[in-house]
Amino acid sequence: MTKQRILVVEDDLDIANVLRMDLEDAGFEVHHADAAMTGLIKAREEHPELILLDLGLPDFDGGDVVQRLRKNSSVPIIVLTARDTVEEKVRLLGLGADDYIIKPFHPEELLARVKVQLRQRGSEALILGDLELDPQKRLARYKEDELRLSPKEFEILALLMRQPGRVYSRQEIGQEIWQGRLPEGSNVVDVHMANLRAKLRDMEGYGLLRTVRGVGYALRS
């Protein structure tokens, strides 16, 4: 099964290495950035499922990173901070952080908070214009009408909706939805995408699903 990606933005390498070991032992794929700007670049290029963000970064404040991320991303952000005041906690949540944890912290508490954020993200409704998916009920709608999808079509659409505009290659879709079990040269992804496009078109969802020739597929943001 594909591992969930976590980006750790932390300039203290000792703390970063401990976080990496704890998270990898828990089954996550961990990426690291030691500065705010590097973290923003990796968040854009590597598409993590969650970000652990230290506030005291060398180039600019972690609060600024939260604001910049929130301009075009809903990725869960847990802030790591030593600033244990009500005012600071209110400020962080107001900027768009999903949670915070005060240093020093116990690894089990951190892992519990990470799992809560990922679980909430996996069950929340996905909305893109007139298109809506409810992962808990496995229900898809377009313009309030039910969109009848196969289980794999539903999973593909949910994948694309979580990052609208991002182009997913056939290999990435195969890896995420079929856990890399498709044989080389298989056209299963293309068949499912064609079916999904036809169902959207039947409901007047023209142009929602975009094919980037030679690259892959995306939903128009």
Image (tube, rainbow, N blue to C red):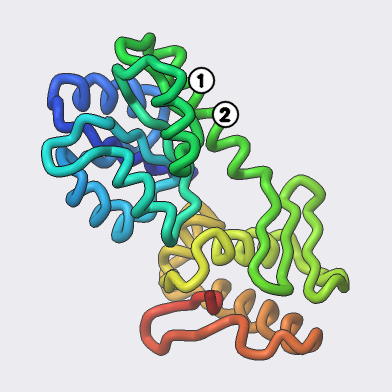
Which residue type carries mark 1?
Answer: Ala
Residue 166 in the image: above or below residue 21: below
Q: Residue lying furthest front in this view?
A: 87
Which residue type carries mark 2?
Answer: Val
Residue 38: % across, % down: 18, 50
Task: Please indicate whether residue 2 sits to the left or right of residue 53 in the image.
Answer: right
Residue 96 in the image: above or below residue 178: above
Residue 150: % across, % down: 76, 65
Task: Please indicate whether residue 105 sits to the left or right of residue 181 in the image.
Answer: left
Label disc, if present, on residue 164 of the rendered structure: none
Residue 124 in the image: above or below residue 126: above
Count of residue discs: 2
Residue 122 in the image: above or below residue 8: below
Badge 2 element: helix
Badge 1 element: helix
Task: Please indicate whether residue 153 sits to the left or right of residue 136 in the image.
Answer: left
Residue 157: % across, % down: 63, 66
Q: Residue at x 42, y 19 (%)?
A: 110
For the residue carrying disc 2, how many other residues have a C-alpha within 10 Å: few (<14), some (14-19), or many (20+)?
few
Could you say which is closer to the camera, residue 9 or residue 146?
A: 9
For the residue carrying disc 1, how many other residues have a C-alpha within 10 Å: few (<14), some (14-19), or many (20+)?
few
Could you say which is closer to the camera, residue 54 or residue 151?
A: 54
Residue that carries the numbered disc 2 in the rendered image: 116
Q: Residue at x 30, y 46 (%)?
A: 65
Q: Quadrant of residue 171?
A: bottom left
Residue that carries the numbered disc 1 in the rendered image: 112
Residue 170: % across, % down: 45, 72
Whether pointer 2 and pointer 1 mark residues with C-beta atoms closer than 8 Å, the reply is yes
Q: Quadrant of residue 216?
A: bottom left
